[in-house]
Image (cartoon, helix red, strand yellow):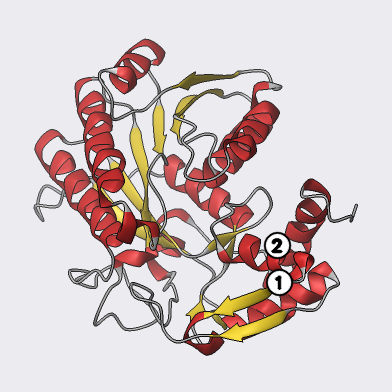
Amino acid sequence: MRILVTGAAGFIGYHVCRRLLEEGGHEVLGLDNFNDYYPVSLKRDRMARLTARANFSVVEGDLAEGDLYASAHRTFRPDGVIHLGAQAGVRYSLEQPEAYVSSNLLGFTKVLEAVRRDPPAHLVYASSSSVYGAGSVSPFREDEAADRPVSFYAATKRANELMAHSYAHLFGLPVTGLRFFTVYGSWGRPDMAPMLFSRAICEGRPIRLFNHGKNLRDFTHVDDIASGVLAALRHPPAADLAAGRAPARVLNLGHNEPVETLRFVALLEAALGRKATLEMLGPQPGDMESTCADLTLARESIGYGPRVSLEDGLAEFARWFLPYHGFGGE
């Protein structure tokens, strides 16, 4: 298959591309703008590992600008599109909301328009567990209303789901949105808890735990997320004309075993072989107190089931983190 992956230099994008190339038989085109939301060097290092492989090429540029995406799509003519390119981060959306309008709304519109004109077999795109806002009850189910987001980032991701549904309804495009739950693992984003905590531990700085470390998170290893993305790609939804249902769906991809942040830190200490200093703080605006994925629909629809335990996942993360960031290790 010919697969186009946006956000290919990102955390999840890199792992999805790597898995596609390891499967063999696929030609993969990556697209990324290499923005400086976090150090570009990490994105370049990920990309270097991909470009060293056969059957992979990359287009560099912003999918929200001009006809960059349309041109890449039209030339490559993908069998499937995995759209992971977006501006991420709940807290950053409080500071720079315009970045989310450009990347998450305009950028996604560019993808949808190109897909409408030259349809692949399936469009899979990244949503987020953040769409479950005020009033949501854990474990979160996909049929909840999700109409009261508590951050602007979440609002843009929920908007993506509605935009995708409208294109599926109007043009018969098979689309699947994936609500990711707190992804961690090697090559992770520096602004996420595992990396922030690990750097603080290794540098002897205190870890700031909001809500006194009582927030519950459904930590999901990136290998499980990549498996879910590829499983979703292989199983496009079908329209049900009799029921008036478009070929669109959203699925949770999580672990279904949330843990308190304090417990996560304790397991991270064990993986790194170092002790943490903790600074307890109150709740952070825009943060959810608990996340947990109901996986019933994902199991039934695409056969998804997480396999990596938190202990094993953090051990894998530590084996990458320590040497990559110069703290010793393997």
The residue at which mark 2 appears reads as: 199
Q: Residue 35 or 8: which is nearer the viewer? A: 35
Check disc 2 and report its element: helix, strand or loop. helix
- Frontmost residue, 223 versus 207: 207
294, 43: nearer the viewer: 43
Q: Is residue 26 above or below residue 258?
A: above
Residue 19: x and y in percent read 63, 38
Residue appearing at x 24%, y 29% in the figure: 110
Residue depth check, mark 2 versus mark 1: number of the one nearer the observer: 1
Gap between marks 2 and 1 measured at Cα: 8 Å
Q: Is residue 251 above or below residue 211?
A: above
Tag 2 near tag 1, CB within 8 Å: yes
Amino acid on which the number 1 mark rests in the picture: Arg
Residue where numbered disc 1 is placed: 205
Residue at coordinates 28% horizontally, 80% vertically from top-left? 136
Residue 165 vs 147, above or below: the answer is above
Q: Residue at x 34, y 75 (%)?
A: 285
Q: Judge by depth and name the residue closer to the eye, 162 or 27.
A: 162
**How far across and down, in percent of the image, does residue 199 sit?**
70, 62
Residue at 25% from the left image edge and 19% from the top image edge: 66
